[in-house]
Amino acid sequence: MVFKSFLDARREGIRDVDADLCIIGSGAAGITIAREFVGSRVRVCLLEAGGLSADPKVADGSIIDSVGRDYQTWKLSKNLSRLRLFGGTTNHWDGQCVPLEPIDFEKLDWIPFSGWPYAYSELEPFYRRAHGVLRLGEFNYDAVRLTRTLRLERFPFDPSSIETVISRYNPVNFGLAFGQELDGADNLRVITYAEVMRLNLQEGADALSTALVATAAGAEFNVSAKYFVLAAGGIENARILLLSNHQRSSGLGNHSGFVGRLFQEHIWYPSGYILAAKPQPLKLYTEKNDYGAIQVAGHIAVPPEKIKELRIPRYRATLGAFSSWQTIRKRFDRDLRIEDVFVLLQRLDQAGARLLCDVPFDSDLYMLYNYVQQTPSWSSRIFLSDKRDSFGRPHPALDWQISSIDHEGIVKAQTLIAQEVGRTGFGRVKIEIDCNPTTPVEGCIGGSHHMGTTRMSDDASTGVTDGNAKVHHIQNLYVAGSSLFPTCGYANPTLTIVATSLRLAEHLKSQMHKDGLL
Amino acid sequence: MGGITAAGVAAYGASGAIRVGRRCAEFTSASKSAQSARQIGLAFLSTHPNESSEVSLLDALAGRSLHLSALNAAPDIASMLSIMDDVVREDFSAGDTVKCGGWILAKSEARACALFALRARRTA
């Protein structure tokens, strides 16, 4: 990528910058907000800690010092779950998009700290706009309609017990997709290799004056702005607020101790199997299927009313089909064997041919990749480590803690799946998760989704920002991204990140109209 | 030969397909399915010691829409299970299930296998 107007802060000569709007972070949130002001009278400065391509010299800024529970993610190394380059983690995401549902915004008495400061209906118009940004086509996740159009089979389950839900996939790399647009904007300046060291309050006022920025070359400069937006990701947003503790000793926005607290991930835990009574490939669930310019795939989930009845966190499972009986035999030749269960399904002839001779087969056996909402836990948190990066700043430390209700939720959801699989004659289910664990969901990994660390709440005593994402007690500091989410549902966060960022941009515009900036 | 799939023939050729057919015949033998039913039955009995007699199992199965006499007279497990389809689905609808070796089974089918296992032990 080459963008002529972008400034590299490592070069000599960068002086203090004055802007109307300073956005810290150029991932999905930061670029979405920046684009909303392109061509306007608002002078925007977009700061990115990395460069235009992956640079190992800045990588130590992405280090997470993990304490407590072992934190592993989809990307294998936890330090790759954050990317310091233009476009942020959109440089390596798989494009999976799912909206939250109305239940995800409700206060549920078995989910601590649940309840967004606004309802789903408030965000829906922005979800529709986010579909345009992410080039996802119509805002429609109706599984029945989509599967009819695609002529794909769904599981024959009662949707009031186990429903099919849809993901849309379009991996938009925000740097590649929107870099030219930002490069050509006269009112916008992107500065790369700009590490924000701390945020400074105006003397004696509840408003930010500047962001102090450092460069690898050893230089420093200030960005002053009328409005600041922290859009650096769910871990970095909390880190920057905590680092800014020279004027308020607990950091900015941390009046009630919530900055960094309630860290949530999506819990990913492969466990459990569906054995089909007759072979039937269910491509909807095991593959991404072409759908115009995008792809779609299905998953099974516990529907909202059943979630309320069972009082569990939101649950979804992706399915994987086995292609080799040898693999299955290695996993299954203990306890009650799969070939024994075939007797119940009266599949004696097919089982014999395939199982004993390792003949390739259509999908008979589906593995359950459980993908679960993490219940907010006060002890699950980001804080400042004793270890420091090359700029002398403390690394973010992560103490990832998972509640027993998250484990119980998987057990109850899988029991429900087993009942539905048996009731419909589809087959039988094997549950492998320990029903009485010492450690909840031991061995699970995270989805590289960092959420909840600067939660929204209209009550300043229970949140970092208000419903407009403005940091409590600071007039001109806002937060964008998944750190805002009080709860996360099972929805992959990017679509909601873009939607909430569009909503924040609208709010900023209305404030700027009042201020005469727009 | 029963049980040979097109995939098997494609994968293994004619001689391979014959081998598959022979293995298939082994697997579909009454003795193989009886062995499997016994495994399920024993797994059920290990966690339900209060139902470890043929009488108690038949009592538990009584009152369902089953012809107990037909169940009693069934010569093999396949015949037993084939008359239980509706009852099995009712069990799943009602959440009347049991975990055997990790597998979630209808209580009725697990009981039928347990009954089969006890009879096999008795007649051995």
Image (tube, helix red, strand yellow):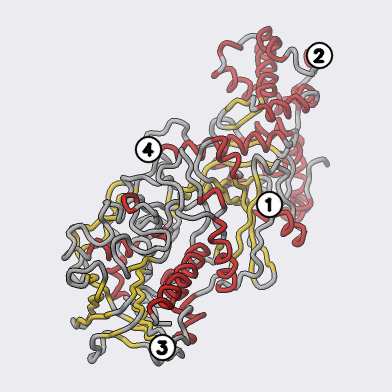
Label 2 environment density (alpha carbons within 10 Å; few <14, some 14–19, many ≥20): few
Q: Position of residue A208 (x, y in %)?
A: 26, 71
3 or 4: mark nearer the eye: 3
Which mark is drawn over residue B73?
2
Q: Residue at x 55, y 35 (%)?
A: A310
- Give the CA separation, mark 1 to mark 3: 60 Å
Q: CA distance from mark 3 to mark 4?
A: 53 Å
Looking at the rendered structure, the secondary structure element under dot 1 is: loop
Residue A507 visible in the shown view: yes
Mark 4 belongs to which amino acid? Thr
Q: Nearer the viewer, residue A505 or A170?
A: A505
Q: Give the quadrant of the C terminus of chain A.
A: bottom left
Front residue of this view, candidates A28 and A123: A123
Q: Quadrant of the N terminus of chain A?
A: bottom left
B10 relative position to A110: left or right: right
Comparing labels 2 and 4, the label whose residue is closer to the camera:
4
Q: Secondary structure at mark 4?
A: loop
The answer to whether dots 4 and 1 both sit on one chain is yes
Foreground tag (1 vs 3) = 3
Q: Are the numbered discs 2 and 3 placed on the same chain, yes or no?
A: no
Between disc 4 and disc 1, the foreground one is 4
Q: Which mark is residue A105?
A: none
- Give the amino acid at mark 1: Pro
Classify mark 1: residues with Cα within 10 Å, few (<14), some (14-19) or many (20+).
some
Cα separation, mark 4 vs mark 1, equals 38 Å
Which chain does tag 4 point to? A
Nearest the viewer among A10 and B14 is: A10
Q: Which residue is mark 3?
A: A187
For disc 3, the chain is A
Q: Chain of mark 2?
A: B
- Residue labelled with disc 4: A439
Q: How far apart in space, not on screen, are marks 2 and 4 (Cα)?
A: 49 Å
